[in-house]
Amino acid sequence: MKIKKYQNITPSNRTNFAMVYHHAGRTLTQIETILKRAYGNPLPVRTRDRLNRLRFKLEQMVARYKQCETDLKLEYKNRKNKS
């Protein structure tokens, strides 16, 4: 699997962040199910830890996105009040 560089990803208006987050969460759950079928339950420690790390990074991205969204709304409100 090859991931695009951050700089090469263009903005898109076709999706919203909540939709992308939920889809990524479902995909992560599907990957976990496939790995459990392959390795057995419970998963090996390294595999489980990597899945948890990816889940945590998704949550961090959402937290950062929400913070940016809040900051932009506040900035928009301040600019609107100044005008």
Image (cartoon, rainbow, N blue to C red):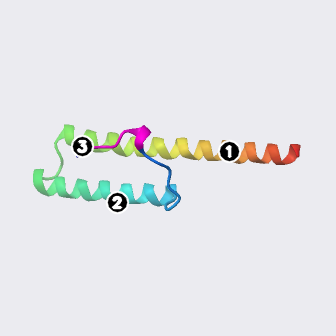
Mark in front: 3 vs 2: 2
> Residue shown at 53%/58% (left/top)?
13
Q: Amino acid at mark 1?
A: Leu
What is the crowding at mark 3: few (fewer than 14 residues within 10 Å), some, or many (at least 20)? Answer: some
> Residue shown at 45%/45% (left/top)?
59
Mark in front: 2 vs 1: 1
Element type where label 3 sits in the image: helix
- Measured as percent of width and height from the top left, residue 15 is found at 49, 60
Query: Which residue is under mark 2?
Result: 26
Q: How far is disc 3 from disc 2 in space, using C-alphas?
A: 16 Å
Query: Which comes sooner in the sequence, label 3 or label 1?
Result: 3
Left or right of 50: which side holds 20? right
Circle on res. 72: 1
Q: Is residue 56 magenta?
A: no
- Measured as percent of width and height from the top left, residue 38 is found at 11, 54
Q: Amino acid at mark 2?
A: Arg
Q: Is residue 3 magenta?
A: yes
Query: Which comes sooner in the sequence, label 3 or label 2?
Result: 2
Query: Which comes sooner in the sequence, label 2 or label 1?
Result: 2
Q: Amino acid at mark 3?
A: Arg
Q: How far is disc 3 from disc 1 in space, using C-alphas?
A: 36 Å
Instruction: For the residues labelled 3 and 1, say whether their Cβ atoms are less than 8 Å apart.
Output: no
The correct choice, above or below, for 70 with respect to 25 in the image is above
Query: Which residue is under mark 3?
Result: 48
- Measured as percent of width and height from the top left, residue 52 is found at 32, 43
What range is drawn magenta here?
2-8
